[in-house]
Structure formats: structure tokens, C-alpha cells
Image (spheres, rainbow, N blue to C red):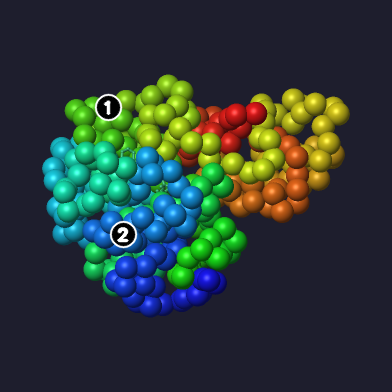
Amino acid sequence: MKAKLISSPRDAAAFIKGGEIVGFPTETVYGLGANAFDAKAVKKIFAAKGRPADNPLIVHIHSMRQLSDVACRITPSAKKLMAKFFPGPLSIVLPRNKKIPPVVSASLPTVCVRMPSLQITRKFLRACGVPVAAPSANLSGKPSPTTWHHVEHDLGGRIPAILKGPPCRHGLESTVVDCTKKVPRLLRAGAISAEQIIGVVGELDIPKAAGKAVSPGMKYRHYSPEAKVFIVKDAGEIPSNAKNFAFIGSAPPPKKAIFSARPKTASHYAKILFAFFRKCDEKKILAIYAQAVPKTGMGRAVMERLKKASHGH
Ligand code: TXA
Ligand code: MG
């Protein structure tokens, strides 16, 4: 199989309606979608990605009218966050409506719902007519795809079609907030910052150790390039005998780095990080030194991903 590259959201939606899976763009990262009501179609996502069955998916909607088919109870904090941040890069965990089969949520009683803002995504979701379950469109364990080329690289031989869109504006996955409890809990940092969420709901439980299994998906090693990732305060921390290494950070790159990127802000860092990891793999780089950023705004999301990528070695 070789994935068909598609420009029309309607043509991509035809695959979903036919019980198939399709890669599609969003403003965060590219997703791999299936009809969220169709357990058989959703299972194809897990097979194509090699995703563990105990890692639940996010259900994507285009209209608030679809919400009651996905979640059976909309809590007060969820209402406030949705009013402020939907559509956008925020996913909310709520009690699951039984219309959504257990396979979508790894048999949890909850479901994670998001309404993307990118226009082509909205057109695609409207044409699908059903909520679309989708994880990021990468092979399990690899960095999330931020261009359709990345999707083609990882899954081109495993899925029937990819809806082509622009490179992703944010470059990191959506913020995930569990709104099933009285105090909402941050499960994954993203473009909607902890500060913004607190501004709307007043309080937010922020689990201490990023990378701990607070969200089922966070226990897996992901976002990872082949190279070892080391977080450094500045380029001065790089060992003098380091070889075949890359550097990413706002500091001037060390002369010996064979590849580097110099993001000016945390948002810029977020946008280029996963593409940088993938380029390092292409160049067969052994070590990546990534400069730490303050954990405010998008900086928290960047640090969370860097910590995950640097785990386990
Ligand atoms: O930006 C995004 O969120 C992208 C685009 C495609 O929307 N999607 C994405 O999906 O990043 P994925 O599967 O790679 O990450 C989904 C995250 C995982 O960490 C998963 O564990 C968590 O959301 N999640 C999903 N359902 C959940 C639930 N019911 N309870 C707790 N966490 C859940
Ligand atoms: Mg993912």
C-alpha cells in the first residue's frame, strides 16, 4: 500500500466514512483519524502506528453539537475551558458517552475531546459528519509529525491516505486537562499554558514530575529521536570530547556541533523541535544537546517533551 496524497478535505472524509483511516493536519501536530463510533476502524489506527492498546485516543469534533455524543457529562470547569479555548490546541478529559466504544479510550470510563481550529481540519471534520478519534500520526515511539512529509515517512506504507495541509503552527501536541474532578488536572502541557487555564478556572492541579504516568500515554517513551537527548543549561555544559552531536537552543551553537537550530522563543522552540529531532535522525547524529528554557507559557510544554525524549538512557 502507498498512501494517496489528498488536497481535498471532502475526499479525505470519504475514507473516514468508508471505515478507513486517514492522516490529517491540525494546528498542533498531524493526526491519524478514524470514525470514533466505529471500533473496527479505530483498531486500524492502533495497528498502523504500533500503538499499545492501553494508550487512549483523542476524539476530534467540529461543532459543540457533537459533544453530547462523545461525553455524557460536561463539568463546570470543562464548560468554562471550552467556552474560552475551543476551537484550539486544548483537549479535555470528561466522562465517556457509551456511544464511543471502549477501544477509543483504552477501556477507561473517560474520553478526551478536542476541537481543532485549523480551517482545513474543520472542513475535514465537518465533511466526516462523525467525531474522529485520532492520535498523532507517527509510528509509536517516534516524534509527532509536524508536516505531511513526516506522516508519509512513518506511515506512507501502512495507511491508505494523507490529507495534505500546512506545516503545523504549534508543533507540539495539544494541552490535555482532566476535567472529571473538582479541581482540573494538567495531564500534558501544550500551547494553551497552565497560566491561561488558571486564568479561566482559578485552580489547576499540576503533577510534579513531568513524564510520570499521569496520563496513560505519558508513561511511554516517546517524542524520541534515535540520538540520545541531553538537557543542558547552556552550551558550556557540553563535554569537550563530544562527537557527532547537534545543538538546539537560544545560545550561540558550539563550533563543533554538526547540526544546530537557534529558536528565539519558547513558541519557536516548540514549533521546530520535532522536525529538528527527525533531521538529526536523517543525519545519523548520536547525541542532541538541548538547552533548557524557563517552565512558563510554552516553555513548560517544551521542557516536558525534552524530559520525555531524554528518558531511558
Ligand atoms: O494535538 C494533539 O493532541 C494531537 C492532534 C492530532 O489532535 N493528538 C495527539 O494524540 O497528540 P496522542 O494520542 O498522541 O496523545 C493523546 C494523549 C495521550 O497522552 C493520552 O494518554 C491522553 O491524550 N488521553 C487520551 N484519552 C485520555 C483519557 N481518557 N484520560 C487521560 N488521558 C487521555
Ligand atoms: Mg502521540
Tell me the element at label 2. Answer: helix
Q: Is residue 195 left or right of residue 309?
A: left
**Quadrant of the image occupied by residue 227:** top right
Tell me which label, 1 or 2, sits earlier in the chain. Answer: 2
In the displayed structure, 18 sits above or below 201; it is below
Tell me the element at label 1. Answer: loop
Q: Is residue 63 visible?
A: yes
Cβ–Cβ under 8 Å for marks 1 and 2: no
Q: Nearer the viewer, residue 262 or 256?
A: 256
Residue 87, image x, y percentages: 30, 55
Residue sitting at 41 percent across and 56 percent down? 45
Question: Mark 2 vs ligand 1: CB under 8 Å?
Answer: no
Which amino acid lies under the numbered mark 2 shown in the image of this protein? Answer: Lys
Q: Nearer the viewer, residue 285 or 116?
A: 285
In the displayed structure, 141 sits above or below 162; it is above
Q: Nearer the viewer, residue 202 or 135?
A: 135
Residue 274, image x, y percentages: 58, 48
Residue sitting at 16 percent across and 38 percent down? 75
Which amino acid lies under the numbered mark 1 shown in the image of this protein? Answer: Glu
**Quadrant of the image occupied by residue 107:** top left
Q: Is residue 49 left or right of residue 75?
A: right
Give the number of the disc on residue 40.
2
Q: Nearer the viewer, residue 169 or 11?
A: 11
Q: Is residue 144 visible?
A: no
In the displayed structure, 55 sits above or below 21; it is above
Q: Which residue is the site of mark 1?
A: 203
Q: Residues within 10 Å of mark 1 (few under 14, many from 20)?
A: some
**Quadrant of the image occupied by residue 74:** top left
Residue sitting at 31 percent across and 59 percent down? 40
Q: Is residue 240 left or right of residue 11?
A: right
